[in-house]
Amino acid sequence: MTTNTSTGIRFAYGAMSAVILGFIVLPLVGVIWMSFFSNKILAFPPQGYTFDWYARAFAAQEFREGFIVSFETSLIAMATSLVLGVPASLALVRYNFPGREIITNILMSPMIVPGIVGGSALFVFFLEIEMLTGVQIAGTAPGLIIAHALIALPWTVRLVSTSLIGMNRSVEEAAYSLGASAMTVFFRITLPIIKPGIIAGALFSFVVSFIDLEKSIFLVGPGKTTLQIALINYLEWNLDSTIGAVATVQIVLITVLLLVTDRYAKLNRAF
Amino acid sequence: MTSQAVAIDTSPMNEQPKPRPNMTAPTLLGPATIFVVLGLLAPLALMFRNSFNRYDPRELMVSAFTLENYARFFQDEFYQEVLFRTVWISALSTLICLIAGFPLAYFLVRQASDRLKSKLLILIIVPLLIGNAVRTAAWMLILNDQGMLAAFLRMSGYTGSLGLMYSTTGVVIGLVSVLLPFMVITLHSVLESIDRNLEDAAASLGAGHLTALRRIVLPLALPGILAGTLLCFILSMNAYATPVLIGGPKFHMMAPTVYQQVSKAMNWPFGSALAFILMAVTLALTVGASSIVQRRYRRWAE
Amino acid sequence: MPEVILQDVAKHYGSSVAVENMSMHISPGELVALLGPSGCGKTTTLRMIGGFVDITSGRISVGGRDVTALPPNRRNMGFVFQNYALFPHMTVAENVAFGLEMRKLSKSDISGKVAQALARVRLSSFADRLPKQLSGGQQQRVALARALVIEPDVLLLDEPLSNLDATLRQEMKIEIRQLQQSLGLTTIFVTHDQDEAMSTADRMVLMRQGRVEQVGAPDEIYDQPASRFAAEFMGIPNLLPGRMNGPGRFELEDGTTVHLDGQKRYHGLCVLALRPESIGIGKDAPVGAFNSLPGTVEIVTYHGASLEYRVRLGTSTFLTARTAAPGLGGPDAIPIGTEVRLFWPYASGVLVPEV
């Protein structure tokens, strides 16, 4: 605590912060609230409260399917990003070789290139492959998974690398000096110590993949539409509490996932 | 993380572990690198090449080497207006984020207790990862003429129509709320690296709070302010959901236009050219801004 | 216990030299301190012995066995790291058991040895704690127990006391020394603290910029520093530059001549090192004092058992004299500003080269 700030200044910061935080958080609270309104046409004040919108959201094929597609895609994307990302992080942190910087930048590039640009490039790329070989990728599950694994990979690499860098190397040396082989050191010392980083990386990857909009929008197809795309398609024509119900489900799911992630690695370190 | 006493050995005599020249690193890195190269860099390269091709309504794309797609952008006022609108809306949203983000970040670092801070940080980060579709939907439910905001205004006696949906103001509100957490987190980490004793020292030498902010905190926080500003600006330049949903079909910004050309009009050459113009303008503006800021404040920042 | 021999060991990183032609013979059961300022190569040397740094040239052997090419996991050395490097995800007992597991001992042997090792460092009741639940001193003792339980040929300690506060450091110093002596362990430890080295080691190796500056028992190095660097590092504050101008006569820079043991000969510029406790201070020098210089008391500092006077001679020369505290048989304290005389016997100064 600083001692030199007067009560007035402290109050001013507190008040401003409350307003700004409200601006960030209240819309989401509002959505959750509105998802329970019993009004047929969305209006204020609520005439009463109901769970009907959740039933309607669940009954709507686009949302049910969208949720399943999103969940499956994100899960596979997460697994892919772990399989590719954990070894890559290990190499980036532990080895010094020419071109390390370049490889790091390459692996981080999906985070830097704007989603719409990367998405349209991938879309055209897939269609050109299709024209050449007849194999359809855009609009299929593999196409979506490739796009989502690309989104997830840099986050996995970043979180796993951070935990590897934060790991005390002399712990491994201690294990060596006590007679452990390289394999033993990796599986009994390194892996357990970076496990929180791997779990956080996995959960985080899942979330960033789940919420992706800009890349997916090019690659969805009939029966292969993610929840985010289903949402914006619906929003173009409708604005009712069904949206609130779907949004609430997503808010709850992601909040839970992130709270779990935060237990393994502080969320603000991911940025 | 737990409180592992992590004392990274900084002794200059300490070498990296000693992997003898072998295939370990390439084997570990190869798959991930190839994946990104094939999934992002090759498509980008291809897209760059495509931007010089010619669009043909029947064959989609004819291989060529022409600048006509770029020329079309510079000849058609509509697209220039789209770019111009994208730039100024991004600049405005970023500025608002900066002004609104600083007090919150400062509060987190200097005034909130550790417990409160970690709770608030989660409260700021979670919305960031709720997804733009949901966050924009939330604003639509609030901003539309029958929405929450209008209802509250009616209760306080305001009877006019709100008219925020499909307006520039609405888009800016949506963008700011999407981007603000990025700004707060970036500012938070740079402010945290500034020793709070410096402000106390300034105060002990007679500086008021605002003077201490301006003369001490601001120059030291400049790298973070710049980073946060650029991040918000870049994200805003490429925003998709907010302009499409809050702006509506008649509100045009760059990212939706790229999508429109590539995916709907199937004019890949022009869409590709638009995408590269967007990236080039973003890059030029961010590099330009950061070099001006750095030159201007070098004497402080050093 | 085996002896440790280093023969012309060197470590180069590209063109920069970390350690150059280091040769050392450490006798069985001896405790040797590698001492020097940061960057002098002491830690690199220790890590080379431990096998964590490949050596560029030379040979290291332990008990006649050449270990130069052996990886650390086959050297059978106990290594205690500066930050202890306890496995954070294992309990104290698991940490200590790890090395025994690697040696494929039976479960019952392991638990017996672990219990014994923990008892030796008085941590039996902490067996099931995690390292982060322990204090710094306790973590240090776990690290020691873990290194000792494998019955290593050599014990290596890297700045083992640097992360502890002053009281604990004192305790641990004694504890390490006792353990080392009762087990008769050949031990090498690295420190930048000359006090720590002097009070613990049988022999000290003073290093500077990758080379050995001086080797000897603590009192040898303190009494007979081989260079200005050694004298400074051993904490001798009085270093007076000058030159010999005749047998037993040393002329200071300001022209004053002081008297020395006649056998000491150096040509050219050199430095007279005077230990503060060998300098007497008083209103008058005793009759027949060989060296006596006038000065003014500038600063008096109390060090518990002793008093230290910083005395100005002339314009820019200062000497530090130390006396026992008044309560402990020393003379009464002399106030600041007093005109005094400093005196010392001719044999107490050491001439060292000016490098």
Image: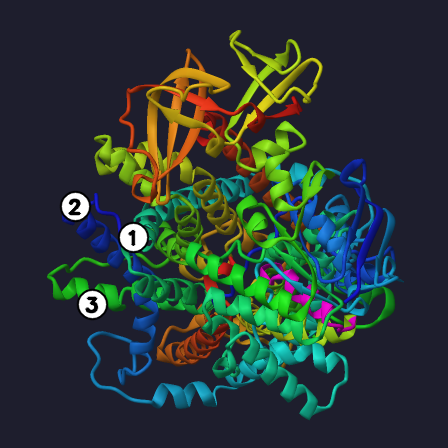
Q: Quadrant of residue A115?
A: bottom right
Q: Chain of mark 3?
A: B
Q: CA distance from mark 1 to mark 3?
A: 32 Å
A174 or B200, nearer to the observer: A174
Main secondary structure of the magenta stretch: helix
Q: CA distance from mark 1 to mark 2?
A: 14 Å
Name the kind of residue labelled 1 in the image.
Phe
- Position of residue C151 relative to residue C294, above or below, is below
Q: Tell me residue B27's x, y (percent).
A: 83, 64
- Position of residue B223 relative to residue A266, above or below, is above
In the image, which residues are magenta? A165-181
Q: Tell me residue C206's x, y (percent).
A: 67, 41
Name the kind of residue labelled 3 in the image.
Ala
In reply to whether residue A166 is colored magenta, the answer given is: yes
Label 3, secondary structure: give it: helix
Residue where numbered disc 1 is placed: B107
Colour setting: rainbow
